[in-house]
Image (cartoon, rainbow, N blue to C red):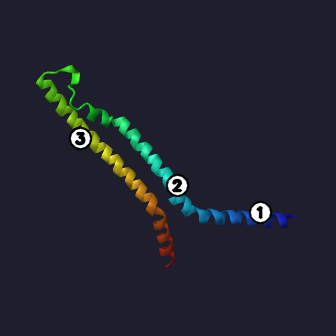
């Protein structure tokens, strides 16, 4: 009785492991990649909201503190321009880091397979 259960469940576990190993590349480059990209899109949207980059761009020609004289408008324009440039650089940094994560996700299995083959040779 124990031998029957042992062989039955051993075969079932072995079949599950084989199916998981064969399904892994499909998941990694399919649903896993889609989940990663959606997470990165949400991450970048949160970073944009945190930096409020679009708000600064939208209000670039409005004077700060309701100073409508030419000095106030000039100072406001250059202050907002500096803020937009700085915040765009920060946003570009987060965009590049996100692209690095996606490239790493795509290339990682090939790198692991290469290293495994390299160890056997």
Horizontal relation, residue 74 to residue 80: left or right: left
Alpha carbon distance from label 2 to label 3: 34 Å
Q: Which residue is disc 2 drawn over? A: 32
Asked whether 69 or 4 is in front, the reply is: 69
Q: Residue furthest bottom?
A: 121
Residue at figure coordinates x 75%, y 65% from the top left? 10
Tell me if residue 88 comes above or below residue 10 in the rendering.
above
Residue 93, image x and y in percent?
32, 47
2 vs 1, front mark: 2
Disc marking residue 85? 3
Tell me if residue 80 comes above or below residue 92 in the rendering.
above
Q: Which residue is disc 1 drawn over? A: 9
Alpha carbon distance from label 1 to label 3: 62 Å
Residue at figure coordinates x 52%, y 55% from the top left? 32
Residue at figure coordinates x 21%, y 20% from the top left? 66
Figure quadrant of residue 57: top left
Residue 80, image x and y in percent?
22, 33
**Classed neighbour count for the residue bearing mark 2: other residues with Cα under 10 Å, few (<14), some (14–19), many (≥20):** some
Horizontal relation, residue 77 to residue 23: left or right: left
Q: Are marks 2 and 1 in contact (CB under 8 Å)?
A: no
Query: Sequence-wise, which precedes: disc 1 or disc 3?
Result: 1
Residue 88, image x and y in percent?
28, 42
- From the image, which quarter does the N terminus lie in? bottom right
Horizontal relation, residue 14 to residue 40: left or right: right
Tell me if residue 70 comes above or below residue 86 in the rendering.
above
Asked whether 58 or 72 is in front, the reply is: 58
Query: Sequence-wise, which precedes: disc 2 or disc 1?
Result: 1
């Amino acid at each position: 009785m124990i031998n029957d259960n042992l062989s039955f469940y051993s075969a079932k576990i072995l079949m599950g492991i084989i199916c998981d190993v064969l399904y892994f590349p499909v998941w990694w480059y399919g649903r896993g990649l889609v989940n990663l990209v959606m997470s990165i899109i949400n991450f970048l949207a949160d970073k944009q909201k945190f930096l409020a980059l679009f708000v600064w761009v939208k209000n670039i020609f409005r004077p700060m503190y309701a100073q409508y004289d030419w000095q106030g408008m000039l100072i406001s324009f250059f202050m907002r321009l500096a803020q937009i440039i700085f915040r765009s650089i920060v946003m570009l940094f987060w965009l590049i880091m996100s692209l690095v994560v996606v490239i790493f996700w795509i290339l990682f299995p090939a790198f692991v397979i290469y290293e495994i083959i390299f160890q056997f040779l």
